[in-house]
Image (cartoon, rainbow, N blue to C red):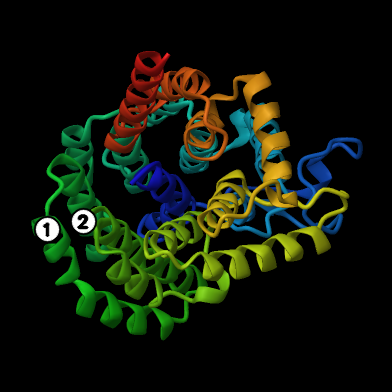
Amino acid sequence: MKLMARLIALSALSTLCSSALAFDDTASLSVKSGDIPSNKVIATWSAQPQAKMTIAQAQTVLSQSRYPDATGNERQQVIRFIHYQKQQKRSLSASAQTQLMVLEAKVLQGTHQFREAEAILNEIKTPLYAPALLLLADINIQQGNPAAAKKHCQQLVGKTSYLLAFTCILNAEFTLNTNSASYEKLLNLEAFAEKSRVEKMNANNTSIKQGGASERLWYYETLAAMAYTLDKPETALSHLNKIDTQKLPVSALLLWSDAKLKLSKSQDVIKRLTAIQAAAHRNSNSTEKNIDDGLLLRLAKAERQISLHDTEIQKQLADRMALRTWREDVSHAAQVASYFLDIDYKPAIALKFARINWQAAQTRSDARLLARAESAVATSSTLN
């Protein structure tokens, strides 16, 4: 299952950390509009001059970057917000500074700067701070250390919801030992997940409602990823069907696409992802049809599965990959390697980017991608 475990973890954590925050009595980080210089650009969300900018707003914007209708500017907006807030550090409360550190770590994590993110989280003085523990668990999984990740997850027990803590633990266990045992344990929590959803939907607190939805999304996405890894694509799709399919994050759409492709249902992938691309184009100010690299790659794979070649989609993907190759983009290295293995077969380039990716992330899927590229180069050398 190439790239999937990492994509799901990176995607879901943007909102899960907000969910974990709901269990901490922390102050909201805000700036009064009068404190902001008139020529200072912090973010492009619609804020009236009298409005306050809060960390909750920044978290929402960062979360929006997970979805296929993202503009592509969300992360930069949050970076500007963080930069401004760090300039005001002396006036921030301790709890606000802690929230800002977690937000900055999430941004770094999203661009595969795992060591830098971990260093920031380790500076947090609040012991057993749930959002930091959740991020540290994921970072350790990305760096190929699921045993350490599990320890961080175990510290979440009692600090956040039961469902979030045990999904984290079982996800780490599954990464340690990929078998059906952890999957079955997580599946047994489904009734609890649904009960928790009803309780939180009836809550008066909006953040609790949003947190419950985020936890439920992560739970079913994690179940689906496990099922897919265990070669159960139909079961993976059934888990994803428990989520609002009209508003899936990119990570879930990638998993959905992979499961459909494994079942040779390429037309389903083409229909859905083409519609997403068309919507992205309508919502964009650019003439380019914006769509996530991973989704574009799945769309091209679907076309190839039904023997379509040299399509507009494949030309667009080729242009995108040429740019990524020229930049030697670390955050897209795994997708570049996959492209040169599955679409435009060039084993040497695939191996180069699989190695670049391995320097940043070392999950089992990253190891499998590297092994595929090494095998392809060895086979190519033998044939030549």
Q: Residue at x 39, y 31 (%)?
A: 121
**What kind of residue is marked 1?**
Ser
CA distance for labels 1 and 2:
7 Å
Residue 305 in the image: x percent, y percent?
A: 51, 56
Confirm whether residue 348 shows in the render.
Answer: yes
List the residue tagged with mark 1. Answer: 180
| Label drawn at residue 253 | none
Q: Is residue 383 left or right of residue 347?
A: left
Residue 51, located in which quarter of the rendered image? bottom right
Q: Is residue 299 above or below residue 131?
A: below
List the residue tagged with mark 2. Answer: 230
Confirm whether residue 55 shows in the render.
Answer: no
Q: Is residue 161 left or right of residue 173?
A: right
Residue 379 in the image: x percent, y percent?
A: 35, 21
Residue 81 in the image: x percent, y percent?
A: 69, 39
Q: Is residue 99 above or below residue 51?
A: above
Q: Residues within 10 Å of mark 1 (few under 14, many from 20)?
A: some
Disc 2 is placed on an element classified as loop
